[in-house]
Image: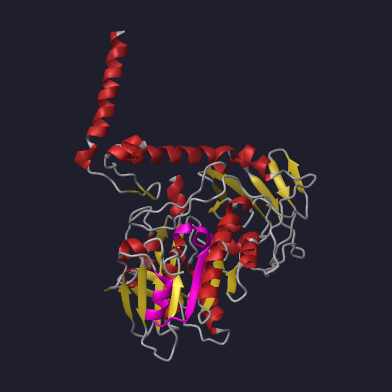
Amino acid sequence: MRRHIAFIFLFLIILISLVAVIPIRGVKSVSYIENRDLQPFPSITFQSIIDTSYQQNLEKALSDQLVFGENFKSTYNYIKSLALKSMSAFYTVSIEKKPQTAHNPVKVDNEAKNQNSAEHDGELSQSGLKSALGESLNENASENTTSSERNESNNNFATEPAKPDEITSPLNIQGNTITHNTEDTDPNKAAIETKPDKVVDSSGQIMHFYDALTYNAGFSTDVSYKIIPRGANILEINSSNHLLYTPVAADIYMPLLEKRAACYNKLVKDHPDVNFYLLYIETDIDADFFNCSFPHNILNNYVSLLDPKIKHDKLLIQSVSDYQNLFFKTDHHWNAKGQFEGYKKAIQLIKGENEELIDISIVQIEGLKTNGSKSRIINDFTISDDFTFLWAELPSYSTLINGKEGIYGKKSDYLKGDYPKEDGSNHYGNCNGWDYGIVEYGFNQPGKDNLLMFIDSFGNSVLEFIAAHFNKTYVVDLRYYEKENGAPFNFKEFITENDVHEVLFFGPYYFHTNELHLIGNSGG
């Protein structure tokens, strides 16, 4: 009995100590393992006690601020990730692809309609897959925001994968392996890895420069691949180690798209003298990798809701190889090849096919690896990417960050070999630039138009290249504008004061559905 009492007493001392040490250590604001802001200790008021918000926030703060709490969560995520991977023989989905005519032609027009999911004989439904895969498909894969890293914020992911709208070939189930006979959208794509145009030795740091226009990362998945659940709603393509989010269900994305389209359509109506453009970037959540299906449902439904006066284009994922070649393995962002394609799409959308593109290089620093947001979520740093970024010699220009002169991004530092060396470093944000309320570029080309651009962090990697085609470019991230500039963004006042007649909405699903990116009523 005394032993039990002593054990309980010791446990309470340890627990109290972990809490008592918090003021000495200081309150932490960011969890780099979970990639999110941490709950601070709330201020106590009579009203907050009455409505119980104080108690709820205090509980969250104690959970977030507990000493060694991040280490416990990190260890838990790592063990869970390894356990899921070790059981991959049971969880693996193998999709065999036989090159034929593509069965998922792209169709994007204003008559696109939301199709209901259909289940077919011989098909293992996505709900069945979810049951078999357990919590890895049941957890909410939300994009969390950290005040220091400023990654996209989106809490509207589906809690289970969307079902494919159409399956034109049956699934063959043999034991624990699922084989899907289907077609390759690009069966002739060769796995040709581009050779660098030049190799530079900068103080012992070897840097490879590739022509962005012709660069090919060398991935070609045209036979089969297997999917392994890694926990936290993240999957892995075993052949290339690309980490994937699962698709978003229609009942999640449709209300969000309808709200966003209504906002943009009102802007078109209220400002008939302004040209509006929209670029939609498909990512892993736009595809169904379980069935090797690329139906473009989110894009099709979105476009069908937009005013025809909004000129739009898209960067499509039409095959497994497309995703592998355009996106990092471990991060939700696009790699340098994807970034260049996005830049090209944006410029040709606004300026036309005849606009001369900037001579841009893809830079790869030999030995520089990066671990993106997905690897940080599952705490697996054994998977990494060769970090790549875009670089070009541009004419002299000015940059203002929230109204103050500054240098956006650290690409020049990376070219000098000056960058973080720690595992898990967010090279995408550090190199390309963090998210800010507004970044202004001045290229002193008075004969050209001024551009207003609304973005999330996908746009950070291409801002200076797009801006080089205009006189002045104003880049707004509405998640941070009001907080960092002291007032809500007023669309009408802004375009009037800055003589803006070109407006671009630029981003992936996260941008087009996150309500923090909605333009408020004050100027809409």
Residue 221 left/right relative to 421? right
Q: Please identify the residue farthest to the left as the structure is shown.
A: 24
Say if 253 sits above or below 193 in the image.
above
Location of residue 107 in the rendering, given as x and y in whole percent from the top left corner: 70, 68
Query: Viewed as shown, does residue 149 lie left or right of 297?
Result: left
Does residue 429 show up magenta in the picture?
A: no
Q: Magenta region: which residues? A: 490-516
Residue furthest toward the right? 121
Whether residue 29 is visible to the viewer of this picture, yes or no, is yes
Residue 487 vs residue 522, the one in the foreground:
522
Q: Position of residue 241 (x, y in %)?
A: 54, 53
User: Quick one: 8 or 108, which is closer to the camera?
Assistant: 108
The single residue placed furthest to the bottom in the displayed view is 447
Q: How many marks?
A: 0
In the rendered structure, the answer to whether residue 300 lies left or right of residue 30 reads right
* Quarter placement of the N terminus: top left
Q: Is residue 262 left or right of residue 377?
A: right
Q: Indicate whether residue 503 is drawn in magenta.
A: yes
Q: Residue at x 63, y 44 (%)?
A: 92
**Where is residue 371, by image quadrant?**
bottom left
Look at 52% across and 65% down and name the residue there.
Answer: 263
Residue 109 picture location, percent across and down: 68, 70
Q: Quadrant of residue 189?
A: bottom right
Does 449 appear above or below 134? below
Colouring mode (rainbow / by chain / secondary structure / one colour): secondary structure
